[in-house]
Amino acid sequence: MAEYETIRTAAGSRTAQVDEGLRAHMNKVYGTMSVGMLVTFAVAWAVGTSPQLLSVFRDPVTLSPNILGWIVMFAPLLMVFGFGAAINRLSAAGAQLFFYVFAAVMGLSLSWIFVAFTGFSIAQVFLVTSIAFAGLSLWGYTTKKDISGWGSFLIMGVIGLIVASIINIFLGSPAIMFAISILGVLIFAGLTAYDTQDIKNEYLAHAQHGDSEWLGKSAILGALRLYLDFINMFMFLLQLLGNRE
């Protein structure tokens, strides 16, 4: 009986340690993501509210991108693929620095919204996105339902959105943009819940190994995934709900 109590106490202690570690891990994920968001919007605001800086990337009147603007537009996508390929060769500190540089480049690519949309509508949509993101992420974290099967369908949806968005750059169809925006909101809403649960499950699967370097890089990757979910959901909602200047 005493031996059983000892085993049960030890098991309870391990569970408590894992739970505490998971909370710390998720706090780091959300904290890193939040700093990245601040970097992005600070850069976007600084460039978007300065005609001189914005003109380096776009025509201040038509907002059409120049050569540098096209590079900045597609740079975040290339950096995401590069980050995934280089993560194993980076230290945790290097991965975090890369993430913040990526967030700054993303800010450059989004700077045009401060000219195209009113400041009030940007703030309003940001608030709506924040509330939706928090609810979806909380549900993904707490639900007992296994939603891992969503992953392949959602990734296929993202690929479809990228292809459709690139095509519509040249077509300029408002109807296609409207459909893309609705689908984009739904897809990234699903990804918010899916990614949160997947980040949690990845931690639980590796918590016993005690690999602090892996855990550090895993938190940065998790922050990047949720950051992308938030940014994309925000941009699609802005296209639907934002008031243009």
Image (cartoon, rainbow, N blue to C red):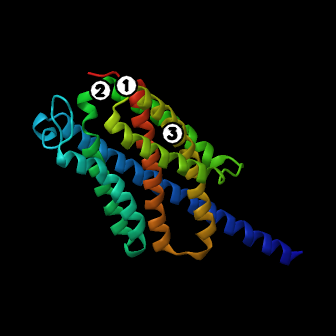
Q: Amino acid at mark 1?
A: Gly
Up-down: is 197 above or below 204?
A: above
Q: Position of residue 10 (x, y in %)?
A: 73, 72
**Farthest front residue?**
171
Q: Residue at x 57, y 63 (%)?
A: 21
Closer to the camera in the image, 148 or 131: 148
Q: Please tell me which of labels 1 and 3 falls first in the chain.
A: 3
Closer to the camera in the image, 13 or 25: 25
Rounded to the nearest angstrom, the CA distance separating label 2 from label 1 is 6 Å
Q: Nearer the viewer, mark 1 or mark 3?
A: 1
Closer to the camera in the image, 149 or 118: 149
Q: Please tell me which of labels 2 and 1 falls first in the chain.
A: 2
**Farthest left residue?**
52
Q: Residue at x 71, y 49 (%)?
A: 144
Query: In the image, is 22 to the left or to the right of 171?
Result: right
Rounded to the nearest angstrom, the CA distance separating label 1 from label 3 is 18 Å
Give the residue at mark 3: 133
Query: In the image, is 233 to the left or to the right of 149?
Result: left
- Circle number at residue 117: 2
**Farthest bottom residue?**
3
